Image (spheres, helix red, strand yellow):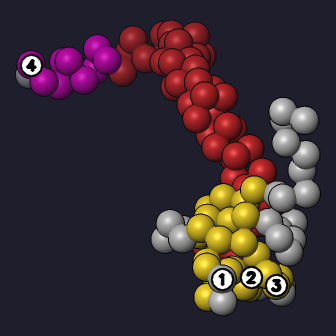
Amino acid sequence: MGPNLLIAAAAASANSGGIAVFVTNIMPLILIFAVFYFLLIRPQQKRANEHRDKINTVQKNDEVITGGGLMGKVTRVTDEYVEVELAPGLRVKAVKSTLSHVESRSRKPAND
């Protein structure tokens, strides 16, 4: 008789509170989701979009770093690949999506 009585009491209290109890219970979850969205998800999406734009606008003579850590200068760009000169006379072909950093050589230095 003990467990059945507890279940009946819980059901009765849930029905008596109705919407107010539901809102009170769901509000912390909504607040947690909002915090995660504004502090984690949204900034990460913004960085990903900026990185994708950099990769799509890579040009000849830009300095790049690949995902494997190789640094070099872009000598040729196609739709999917870039040719990177790692040393004089040493060129490799890399997939654009593996580039982790692009530094445009056409930008003016900050000190000038």
Which quarter of the rendered picture does the N terminus lie within? top left
Q: Is residue 42 magenta?
A: no
Q: Amino acid at mark 1?
A: Pro
**Between discs 1 and 2, the one toward the N terminus:** 2
Q: Residue at x 74, y 44 (%)?
A: 46
Distance from the alpha carbon under mark 1 to that under mark 2:
16 Å
Numbered disc in front, either 2 or 4:
2
**Between discs 1 and 3, the one toward the N terminus:** 3
Q: Residue at x 38, y 15 (%)?
A: 12
Q: Are marks 1 and 3 in contact (CB under 8 Å)?
A: no
Q: Is residue 9 magenta?
A: yes
Q: Which numbered dot is residue 82?
A: 2
Q: Which numbered dot is residue 76?
A: 3
Kindly identify which residue carries mark 4.
2
Q: Amino acid at mark 4?
A: Gly
Distance from the alpha carbon under mark 2 to that under mark 4:
73 Å
